[in-house]
Every structure is written in structure tokens, then in C-alpha cells.
Amino acid sequence: DTAVSQTPKYLVTQMGNDKSIKCEQNLGHDTMYWYKQDSKKFLKIMFSYNNKELIINETVPNRFSPKSPDKAHLNLHINSLELGDSAVYFCASSQYGVDEQYFGPGTRLTVT
Amino acid sequence: GENVEQHPSTLSVQEGDSAVIKCTYSDSASNYFPWYKQELGKRPQLIIDIRSNVGEKKDQRIAVTLNKTAKHFSLHITETQPEDSAVYFCAASSTGRRALTFGSGTRLQVQP
């Protein structure tokens, strides 16, 4: 029983395309996050949602649009993909008032 | 915002030796300091964490120490084993900003 899951695991696409990544957690958490891990392994927060409300929006191009249809799901839509968007995108979740964050398996996005 | 620096970037030890990884943070409001282990192609896994009201925490072969005055914290792994080989990340967050700010990672290699 996977706690935090993401689909797809791999995504290869061409520049200019639009793609989405989906995340689901079955931990009953109310806060979800998107992190980006670049080719040098740096992990950086992109967005955070609490109870479907956007609470953190780092300096991310507006081509990236997160959406949380409910507390258990957080999706990431990316428009007009660029080469620099190639990275591994991790979803994570936590419960408000409890610090521990649990990560999904990641989605490796390759833009050609 | 928060800035977390991590050293060393690579660390090679002999099996059975100890390994120490150090991190410093900048934001005095940070009060939660987790450590994650990431194996190749896998998700970051929480291995130990410490909160600002505690100076030291131990879990079997791993321990973390925190010096709030100096704003630094360290991970200690004793009796290292080849399966400890991975990239280790420190991170920091605060009650007000719950997203994790990560260090740049340390690639630990344990030589058998």
C-alpha cells in the first residue's frame, strides 16, 4: 500500500509540449508539496498546498500550474516545456502540526 | 529566506568507520531539521530528525546533534556499512514556513 504515489514515473516529451504529473497520498495528510531535483541533485521547493489552498509559491515560471482537487491529490501541469525543465519532480505530503514529510517516488521528466 | 549549507559534498570511508556530515542554516526561526537518505534513482527517505528544543537524538547507528546558537547540525553514522552508501541531505523548516529547504547533499561511499 503505497503512501505517496506519482504518475507517470518517466515522461519524455518535446520542447513546447504541455504535460501533467499527478500525485496522490493515502496518509490522510492535509499538506502536499512539489519539489524539483535538478541534474546536480539540488532539491528545491516549488509549491505547497494546505487543504487545497496554495500556501507556498516559490519563484517558479507561470508555465507551471499546480492544482489540488482535494486534500489527497496534487497535480502539476507544465505548459510550453523547455529543455531546462528536465528534472525529477517529487511530490511530498505532511500533516499540519507534524513536521515529517514523506516523498513520492518521483517523476523523471526529460524534455528533448 | 532560509539558506542551508552542507559539507562535505563527497565522503569516502572504510567499512566500520564513522562518517560525519555537517550543515549550517541561516534562519533563526527554523525549528525542524530532518535528514534524508537518497539511493540512486529512489525517493528521499527520512532517516532521522531533530527539533530545536533538543540537542541530540540517536537511533541505533545514526545520531544527529544540533547547536542552535551556532546554527549548525550534524549527522553521525557509526560502524558504517556498504548499504549506507547513498546521498544524504540535511534540511530545515520552520512552523511558519513548513516547506523544507535542503542542503546540497553529501555523497557517502562506504568502501568494503
Image (cartoon, coloured by chain):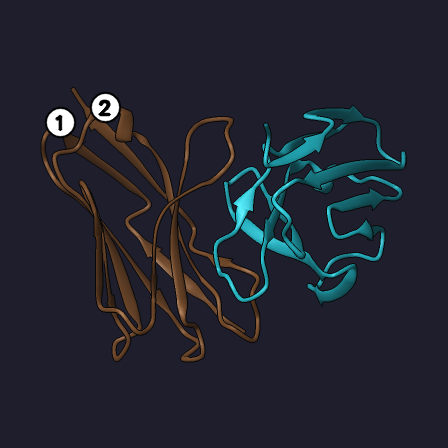
Chain colours: A cyan, B brown
Q: Which quadrant of the view contains residue A108?
A: top right
Q: Earlier in the sequence, mark 2 or mark 1?
A: 1
At label 1, the amino acid type is Glu
Q: On the image, which quarter does residue B103 sit in?
A: bottom left
Determine crowd level at label 2: few under 14, some 14-19, many 20+ residues with C-alpha closer than 10 A. some
Where residue A41 appears, as percent x and y from the top left, is 50, 41
Number of dots carrying numbers: 2
Give percent across and percent down for residue A99.
49, 60
Give B43 or B49, whichever is nearer the viewer. B49
Write down the residue under mark 1: B15
Check if mark 2's residue and mark 1's residue have beta carbons within 8 Å.
yes
The disc placed on residue B67 is none
The residue labelled by disc 2 is B82
Residue B2 pos. (x, y %): 49, 70
Q: Residue at x 14, y 40 (%)?
A: B78
Q: At numbered mark 1, what does the secondary structure look like: helix, strand or loop?
A: loop
Q: Is residue A95 found left or right of A24 in the rendered image?
A: left
Residue found at the far top of this picture:
B112
The residue under the point 84% across, 28% down is: A14
